[in-house]
């Protein structure tokens, strides 16, 4: 039986997008008959529901998880951050200024993980024989650890990217460009989460053969997305699951549009479930909007399934899409997409989904889209057979290229 070493800073039970993606990579590899060893870090933000999913996997006995010990430096870093934040708060500095100051004074523990990761990884590759190393980033530390392990022992390397690392920063950081090029040259194959990111890398790193780069979107698990019964009403309840970020998400046009729509009677009820990292005057927000604390992964899926519709906020930059997109597809619910910009890849990705409404981020467009959503509820609620589009994003279908890569490496 072939053995894979999966290197990922984030791994369940940590509730992070990277950890959840790697959870289903692991499930797929186990189902295809591989043994999987995971090299990961000491975890925070523990979500027991992810651990429960992990323990239901077929061939769970073929999975071994190796965690590096918690770093003393992490405690120093986070303690230092609190001190800096408290001092800067007195001076009324912004969060962005505080964050930049922390970066200058204290290197992030995710980079310091390199030393513990290489130490434990070296022990593993000397004790066991691996078909390949699959490295997942962010953070880029995972790729740098994996690169170093392939210097110690010749093992095929598959790099798996979430967000692009150095794109757009070359003029300011020549070192990043050179380091990433070394990583890409060493890799046997490189996996991206969108076609747009892949194309950008092909164009930027023209010295590297383009057939080395492939796209594997995220997906959803059919069993976890089984429909549930929920209370229906005359209004349309829209849920948003996940975090809201100040640098990315402008909510004012949405709030104004809901006030317009609900002027005579409440058509729309909206729930934001997650961390809200933007300054919001909740007293001035429409009464029909609720802000709720984050929930565990399984509960977040239930919140998707009990909503009448789901809200998706696109990213700026034309490269990335939120991972929740694919779980939204699995819910078979209508999706209101507020585009990040004119190049938002969600527009291309979801154009074949028959329950999507796109809107630019301005009050009139969003109000028009909310009206359309409210008036089309009965049509959207009709159950349909699983479409080709729906089946495309099942994890087992999205990950077929990974199996092909590993089969190819096994022959060489």
Image (cartoon, grey):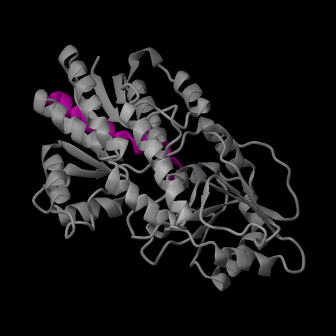
What residue is at 39 percent from the left and 61 percent from the top? 100
Q: Which percent across, then down, holds residue 148?
A: 17, 35
Total of numbered circles in the picture?
0
Magenta highlight: main SS: helix
**Is residue 15 toward the left or the right of residue 227 in the image?**
left
Relative height, residue 126 to residue 201 (above, below): above
Quadrant housing the N terminus: top left
Q: Is residue 235 magenta?
A: no
**Is residue 56 toward the left or the right of residue 274 in the image?**
left
Q: Which percent across, then down, holds residue 64?
A: 39, 19
Of residue 217 and residue 367, the one placed in the foreground of this image is 367
**Is residue 186 toward the left or the right of residue 134 in the image?**
left
Relative height, residue 31 to residue 352 (above, below): above
Residue 221's image quarter?
top right
What residue is at 74 percent from the left and 65 percent from the top? 379
Quadrant housing the C terminus: top left
Q: Which percent across, then down, holds residue 152?
A: 12, 28
Judged from this view, the residue extending furthest toward the bottom is 364
What stretch of residues is rendered in magenta? 386-412
What residue is at 58 percent from the left and 55 percent from the top? 243
Of residue 71 and residue 136, the one placed in the foreground of this image is 71
Q: Does residue 401 appear anywhere in the picture?
A: no
Q: Which percent across, then down, holds residue 193?
A: 38, 53
Of residue 135 and residue 251, the one placed in the foreground of this image is 251
Relative height, residue 143 to residue 102 (above, below): above
Q: Does residue 197 appear anywhere in the picture?
A: yes
Relative height, residue 277 to residue 30 (above, below): below
What residue is at 46 percent from the left and 36 percent from the top? 24
């Amino acid at each position: 039986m072939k053995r894979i070493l999966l290197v990922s800073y984030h791994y369940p039970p940590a509730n992070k997008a990277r950890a959840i993606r790697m959870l289903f990579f692991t499930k797929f590899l186990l189902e295809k008959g591989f043994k999987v060893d995971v090299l990961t870090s000491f975890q925070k933000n523990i979500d027991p529901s992810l651990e429960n999913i992990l323990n239901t996997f077929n061939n769970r006995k073929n999975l071994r998880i190796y965690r590096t010990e918690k770093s003393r430096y992490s405690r120093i870093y986070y303690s230092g951050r609190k001190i800096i934040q408290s001092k800067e708060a007195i001076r009324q500095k912004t969060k962005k200024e505080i964050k930049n100051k922390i970066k200058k004074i204290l290197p992030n523990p995710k980079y310091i993980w390199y030393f513990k990761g290489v130490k434990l990884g070296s022990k593993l590759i000397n004790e066991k024989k691996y078909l390949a190393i699959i490295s997942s980033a962010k953070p880029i530390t995972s790729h740098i650890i994996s690169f170093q392990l392939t210097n110690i022992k010749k093992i095929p390397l598959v790099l798996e990217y979430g967000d692009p690392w150095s794109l757009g920063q070359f003029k300011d950081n020549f070192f990043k460009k050179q380091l990433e090029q070394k990583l890409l040259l060493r890799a046997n194959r490189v996996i991206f989460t969108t076609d747009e990111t892949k194309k950008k890398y092909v164009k930027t790193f023209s010295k590297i053969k383009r057939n080395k780069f492939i796209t594997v979107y995220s997906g959803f698990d059919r069993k976890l997305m089984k429909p549930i019964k929920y209370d229906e009403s005359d209004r349309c309840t829209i849920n948003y699951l996940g975090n809201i970020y100040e640098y990315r998400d402008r909510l004012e046009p949405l709030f104004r549009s809901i006030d317009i729509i609900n002027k005579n009677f409440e058509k729309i009820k909206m729930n934001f479930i997650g961390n809200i990292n933007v300054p919001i005057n909740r007293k001035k927000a429409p009464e029909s909007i609720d802000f709720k604390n984050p929930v565990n992964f399984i509960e977040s899926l239930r919140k998707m399934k009990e909503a009448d519709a789901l809200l998706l906020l696109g990213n700026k930059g034309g490269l990335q899409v939120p991972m929740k997109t694919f779980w939204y597809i699995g819910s078979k619910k209508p999706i209101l997409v507020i585009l990040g910009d004119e190049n938002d890849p969600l527009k291309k990705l979801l154009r074949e989904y028959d329950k999507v409404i796109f809107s630019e981020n301005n009050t009139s467009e969003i109000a028009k889209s909310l009206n359309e959503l409210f008036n089309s509820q009965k049509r959207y609620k009709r159950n349909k057979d699983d479409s080709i589009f729906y089946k495309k994003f099942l994890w087992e279908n999205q990950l077929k290229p990974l199996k092909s890569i590993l089969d190819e490496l096994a022959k060489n």
